[in-house]
Image (cartoon, rainbow, N blue to C red):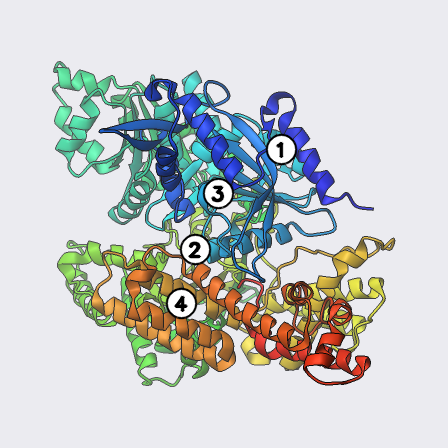
Amino acid sequence: MAELESTIEQNLIDQLTMGESQWTYRPDIHDEPSLWANIKSILENNNKAVLDGTTLSDSEFEQVKNQLSFPTFYDAAVWIAGENGKAMVHVQRDNRTLHLVALDRADKAGGSSVYEVINQYTTTRDTEGTGRNRRFDVTLLINGLPLIHIELKNREHPYMDAFRQIKKYIVEGRFSGPFSCIQMFVVSNAVRTMYIAPAMDNDLNEKFLCGWSDSENKPVANYLDFAKQVLRVPEAHEMVTQYVVLDSESKSVILLRPYQIHAIEAIREASKRGESGFIWHTTGSGKTLTSYKCARNLLQDIPSIEKSIFLIDRKALDAQTKQAFQSYAQSDVVDVDDTENVDDLMKKLGNDDQQMIVTTIQKLHIVMKRLKGKEDTARYKRIHGKRIAFIVDECHRTVTPETQRMLKDFFYNSLWYGFTGTPIFKENAYKAKGDLPRTTEEMFGKPLQKYTIKHAIHDNNVLGFQVEYMGGEGKDAAGRKVALDDSAYDSRAHRLQVLNVMLNQCEQKLGIDNGSGKSYEGLLTTDSIPHAQAYYSLLKEVKEGKTEITINLDFPKRLPDFPKFAITYSVSENEGRSIADQKLMQESMNDYNAMFGTHFDMSQLEAYNTDLTDRLARKKKRYKSRSEQLDFVIVVDRLLTGFDAPCLSAVFVDRNVMPYHAIIQMFSRTNRLFDKFKNNGQIVTFREPSAWKNAVNEALVLYSDGGEASAVSPDWDETEEKFIDAVKKLRTAALTPSFIPAQSIAEKKRFAKAFQNFDRLYASIKAFTKWSEVGLTHYGMTEKDYEDYLAQYKNVIEELPQQMSNDKDDTEEIDLEYILKTYDMAQIDYEYIVALIQEYVSGDGDMDQLRMQKMAEEIEAYIDRLSSTNPKLGGLMRNLWDQVVKSPENFKNKRVSTVLEEMRTGAVKKCVQELCDMYFLKIGAVMYAVEHYHADADIPNMSTIKETGDYERYVAYRENIKKLKYRRKVEEAVRKALLEEIGPFLGEEM
């Protein structure tokens, strides 16, 4: 028999409170009054001098309570970041203000910080009937503040049940008052433990759940081992203060992943030893964020380092990195100094302030040039002798061996830390130039920490790749495959073939079924500016209906204005083609201006590129709306390296084979985590299929640190073979969707396993371009069959955890945490509308009337669509939207999802109350059925509802019928109410 959740909970508390973990168990803190009382006591004790030995009066502590009740977790995080690392509360006493320290990031594992653990905390709800108290499992308090919250399940349940429970609590508004301070969620079913940064309602994305691993990338999954390594003191304190990053652009909290933390610690230790080195973190794993924290932490932890310089190159990358750093640093204790000009840079290099500076190679070159011949000046000596740590993200694109040699010679007292996802090895070393270094290790020193693509894919921190190799090949005299001449690809016919694939055979790759605002994007890369321009012109012709290929008419119905596209490339004033390039670029900018209401011309090319990359990245709120999004961007080399856009899913490649590092860099634009439907980075090549396949395999082996090219999913032939077998096994487990055994646990397990395998392969095969030529019926199954199998699977997977606890047959291993790859359009639409309304009521300062109008039109259209499929929920949404339009000020500081939850709960309560009044039923029994109701499954608790119904009162007040008939009427009424009245308001995420 599996361990009880209460036993797991107690074991965790024991682990946290024993030995070196340093937490104190507080069984007396079990509700909000006792939690506030504890916060007050600790605050007074830690600020005796400021309070002059007095306590806080009730009215004074009310001021504190107001300051410690935050509208979002992000607002709490901003406060925790504090003033010089100290989170303060301010109390008015008489005619003066008392500044009290509530939390000190530097005061860890000693001093005044208090570490306590509580469990079974009761959060109350005032709503009668449907409102229920909730009990939180385990919470860790620092100085009385709930900062880490843990939800536990036993081994019979997936850890995702704990995650879904947290999401439900957020939507219900349970994390309010002092619990609005939470900075880390942990979920576990004892054998698998994950953590995630807090976010509000639908922003809490399961894709970003992260497991812990040690410095050798070995997983730490058991909940007690996790507690030993992550939740003990001071590690837990550091996690929620030192290893948290605030993104002011997206208003989100980011918790570093284990490999990022290990990298920071490795550089810290190396810098103490006076050693340089490099970090090998695969592309897409968050190197910019890691390097930012390294630059910041070196200043904080190593007093001997006077400046940390974050080196970048290229204006486009400069803007993106600078923007990211400014966003991260807005609430940090270290200012990020941008260097607008060289004079400013020289002042910052020469002063005595401990600073982090973001600058370019080019500006440092000018600094050295200006100081040349002035070696005897005080200014030269101050700058020349500075103890500087150079942090270099994408180090080989930023610094050449020649450039680094010059900088090292000038800044002789410097340390160098390079970050790269594609190191230079002896296999792909730089060409020999005198005694200059040729590999990453020769330039920077030994690798301090490795996290390769193999590790990242295994940990689900990045996605793998699905690659399709298309295009023709010739044969030589011996019959061997050879590449076609480049001229074969420079034709209208070839480009139309490419565009036909992109526009009509990539529905899954582009996430068109995800719906408006939720689809993905693609890059089309060519080998030259003229070819890029030719594609742009031809794509315009296709959209205008002037070519022999047409766009699938169903796509624009699901994705308005598809396809929306733009072009970007570097324009040089010195090239012979420059005038033609600029003329055509201006024409494309005019198209862009017409599409998005912008006003760019060639004098604003850099601003245009910044706007385009922001739009493509979709990290700013305004770009969450379909009206502000793109589907494709045509590029030559821009955006193929160092560009981060999680919603970018596909790269279409019409160019010859590239070097190994360039292949990995290009591929890695596609494999960022985004949503639960994005399963792979998608790559389609249109030239030299054999050569591309060999190069990709060799590149992936090289950059998996001696592993295999397992980052690439099977090709069409292999996937189709597996899919055919999956269909056969599903039919064997259940010949038809209705043939699911009602009692046999073993057969239910076989069916669940067969369906999971089928679902996984169905999602994979649909992503291939060839799927558009075949479809599901080709394999002997209709969409209706699939939907029915899916409904049965949901029933079975819901029942199995309870039934398996007494099952001795362990021959079938079932993944109870499996996330279906199928689309739930109703849920997607619901979440999208909520997000749009939230943005509308938030009323960002840069939102002009045109944007407000476009957003309102989009909300109206989606409410109409939702109402057509779910009139009840659509009507609820319409009611809310009407209130927002009428009085937007009433919603300014409210969470739309919480308001909707209250409205939904009220609607459900009304239906339940009317049902209970009509048939004299126990409201608690009916509410249990409501809360555990699942479409297409038997109604839970039905026998209890009938047995506890007051038959005598029904006969007295309604009609005189037999008891058996009364029970039948009750069952029919409950079933009808759940199906028609209550069911439409229910949903897993709602």
Dot placed on the residue nearer the N-terminal end, 2 or 1: 1
Residue placed under numbered mark 1 in the picture = 27
Residue placed under numbered mark 4 in the picture = 517
Q: Amino acid at mark 1?
A: Pro
- How far apart are the alpha carbons under marks 2 and 3? 30 Å
Residue 695 image position (x, y, % from top left): 51, 53
Secondary structure of the residue carrying tag 2 is loop
Dot placed on the residue nearer the N-terminal end, 3 or 4: 3
Q: Amino acid at mark 3?
A: Phe
Residue 446 seen by the camera? no
As drawn, which residue projects farthest toward the right? 808
Residue 185, above or below 433? below
Q: Amino acid at mark 4?
A: Gly
Dot placed on the residue nearer the N-terminal end, 4 or 2: 4
Q: Amino acid at mark 2?
A: Pro
Residue placed under numbered mark 3 in the picture = 179
Residue 792 image position (x, y, % from top left): 71, 72
Residue 688 image position (x, y, % from top left): 48, 63
Residue placed under numbered mark 2 in the picture = 646
Give the left or right position of residue 725, taking residue 488 as reference.
right
Dot placed on the residue nearer the N-terminal end, 1 or 4: 1
Disc 2 residue crowd, few under 14, some 14–19, many 20+, Cα 10 Å: many
Residue that appears at 30% across and 82% down: 544
- How far apart are the alpha carbons under marks 4 and 2? 14 Å
Residue that appears at 62% across and 50% down: 162
Residue 588, above or below 778? above
Secondary structure of the residue carrying tag 4 is loop
Taking depth in this image into account, of 331 and 384 the one nearest to the observer is 331
In the rendered image, which quarter is residue 725 located in?
Answer: bottom right
